Image (tube, rainbow, N blue to C red):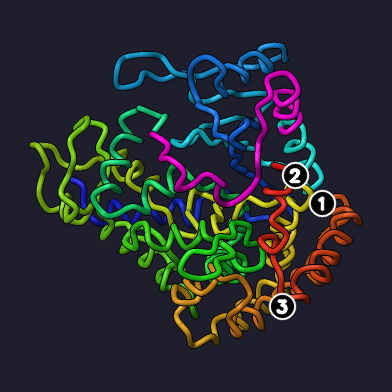
């Protein structure tokens, strides 16, 4: 019978992996997951493109990627037993799909910012070829322009996503909006080469969340307020039991961080148990309760715990590395800036320490600040700390080894600071996505 201690071991390995070499001079790696909205220009304006079928995104991707060496396509059976492509691998990088038809570019771990950028641009060149040959455009923005103009349907009719939709539908409208209408940038960074470094990086990456959301907001929407990151607003209201910032990150230690993440996981309702198929579980059915009593005659296994952890959506998800999830999909011309910001703070030990001392002194609850961050830099606390953090990031980037970061990246972050942060603006104030649609 699985116990809570078994779950603690699973979480501890994700947060403090034993396989990581204890070498302070080892190369830090960087990965990127960037989501895009596929759309076509029509007489009615920009319209979303379906994921499957004639004229679809996957049809276009198969056409273009089929001409590239080393491409592999992976399929799964949907609820009707039909094989559907869900992943395309090209040279270690991948295209994935989201329920609303969004296309995610996933970049393998890279040993420098320049390498990550080149890999990202290589995958984006494939999307550019699709635009030229199939008329499908790809927009980088936190929320699509057609939300509220006819609901999209779940296009990934696999058991996992069907269960997700049913779960969120029982809570309210924000779950569907999150699944079908939002795009984010996930920044994947190493947790660190020793326990002390990992403790600080986990803590600081969480505490940075409201400030990064505000700094790089790119989903403006005037609805009950002047939102700059409406994507963040949607996430805040999707399900508070499985989203947000860990509350154990101020004045942290290893035990507190692990226990905080375990408590978060244990108290989150179960959504999808593969061995139970399409069975919809009552919302009060948590992992904690499953440990106490079987469901449908079965008890949880280690694989069930790992599956449950993939259905948690905190601002920083632990996966053996830091999956940072706080940023709207940014405009293409500025897409490296959030990565530079996080690298400058988290990959410089001195800046990580300075950021921790700065942020752990904030008396306001971080999840409350995250709510305010959807309005961009309007909040006085967010604006003040975000400015100071951007300064720390610029200084930290200058401390990183040449070859890991290029001079042009340092210039780019400085230009962003001058043109946006110092003017109390974010990408949302430019609304480049709509300009692109004209």
Who is closer to the viewer here, 432 or 373? 432
Compare marks 1 and 2 and give the one earlier in the sequence.
Answer: 2
Who is closer to the viewer here, 1 or 403? 403
Residue wearing tag 3: 387
Cα separation between marks 1 and 3: 25 Å
Q: Residue at x 18, y 40 (%)?
A: 280
For numbered disc 1, what is the local secondary structure? loop
Confirm or deny contact between disc 1 and disc 3 (CB under 8 A): no
Residue wearing tag 2: 111
Is 165 displayed left or right of 254 in the figure?
A: left
Q: Position of residue 132 (x, y in %)?
A: 76, 23
Q: Residue at x 54, y 64 (%)?
A: 222
Q: Position of residue 119 (x, y in %)?
A: 75, 36
Q: Which mark is residue 404?
A: 1
Q: Which residues are magenta?
A: 124-153
Q: Position of residue 259 (x, y in %)?
A: 35, 66
Confirm or deny contact between disc 1 and disc 2 (CB under 8 A): yes
Q: Residue at x 20, y 56 (%)?
A: 288
Q: Is residue 284 visible?
A: yes
Local crowd at mark 1 within 10 Å, few (<14), some, or many (≥20)?
some
State whether residue 170 is above or below residue 372.
above
State the image quarter where residue 394 is shown: bottom right
For numbered disc 3, what is the local secondary structure? helix
State whether residue 306 is above or below residue 78.
below
Q: Is residue 262 magenta?
A: no
Q: Which quadrant holds the N terminus?
A: top left
Is 219 displayed left or right of 293 in the figure?
A: right
Q: Residue at x 43, y 68 (%)?
A: 246
Q: Which mark is residue 217?
A: none
Cα separation between marks 2 and 3: 28 Å
């Amino acid at each position: 019978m699985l116990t809570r201690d078994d779950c603690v071991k699973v979480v501890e390995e994700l947060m403090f992996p034993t396989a990581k070499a204890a070498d302070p001079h080892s190369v830090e790696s960087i990965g990127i997951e960037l989501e895009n909205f596929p759309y076509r220009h029509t007489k009615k304006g920009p319209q979303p493109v379906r994921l499957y079928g004639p004229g679809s995104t996957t049809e276009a991707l198969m056409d273009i990627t089929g001409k590239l060496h080393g491409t592999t396509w992976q399929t799964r059976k949907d609820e009707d037993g039909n094989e559907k492509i869900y992943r395309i691998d090209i040279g270690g990088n991948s295209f994935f799909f989201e329920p609303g038809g969004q296309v995610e570019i996933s970049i393998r771990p890279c040993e420098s910012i320049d390498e990550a950028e080149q890999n990202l641009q290589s995958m984006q060149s494939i999307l550019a070829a699709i635009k030229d040959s199939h008329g499908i455009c790809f927009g980088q923005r936190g929320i699509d322009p057609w939300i509220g103009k006819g609901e999209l349907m779940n296009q990934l009719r696999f058991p996992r996503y069907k269960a997700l939709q049913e779960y969120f539908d029982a809570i309210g409208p924000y779950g569907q909006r999150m699944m079908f209408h939002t795009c984010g940038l996930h920044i994947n960074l190493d947790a660190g080469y020793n326990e002390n470094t990992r403790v600080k990086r986990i803590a600081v990456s969480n505490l940075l969340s409201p400030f990064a959301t505000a700094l790089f907001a790119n989903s403006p929407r005037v609805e009950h307020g002047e939102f700059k990151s409406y994507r963040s607003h949607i996430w805040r209201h999707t399900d508070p039991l499985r989203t947000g910032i860990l509350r154990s990150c101020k004045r942290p230690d290893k035990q507190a961080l692990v226990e905080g993440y375990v408590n978060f996981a244990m108290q989150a309702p179960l959504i999808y148990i593969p061995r139970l198929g399409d069975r919809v579980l009552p919302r009060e059915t948590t992992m904690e309760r499953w440990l106490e009593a079987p469901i449908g005659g079965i008890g949880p296994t280690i694989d069930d715990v790992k599956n449950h952890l993939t259905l948690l959506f905190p601002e920083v998800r632990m996966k053996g590395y830091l999956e940072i999830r706080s940023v709207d999909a940014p405009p293409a011309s500025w897409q490296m800036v959030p990565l530079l910001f996080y690298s400058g703070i988290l990959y410089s030990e001195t800046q990580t320490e300075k950021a921790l001392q700065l942020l752990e002194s904030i008396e306001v609850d971080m999840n409350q600040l995250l709510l305010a961050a959807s309005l961009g830099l309007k909040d006085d606390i967010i604006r003040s700390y975000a400015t100071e953090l951007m300064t720390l990031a610029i200084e930290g980037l200058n401390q990183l080894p040449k070859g890991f970061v290029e001079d042009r990246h340092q210039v780019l972050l400085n230009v962003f600071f001058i043109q946006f942060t110092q003017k109390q603006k974010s990408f949302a104030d430019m609304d480049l996505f709509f300009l692109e649609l004209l």
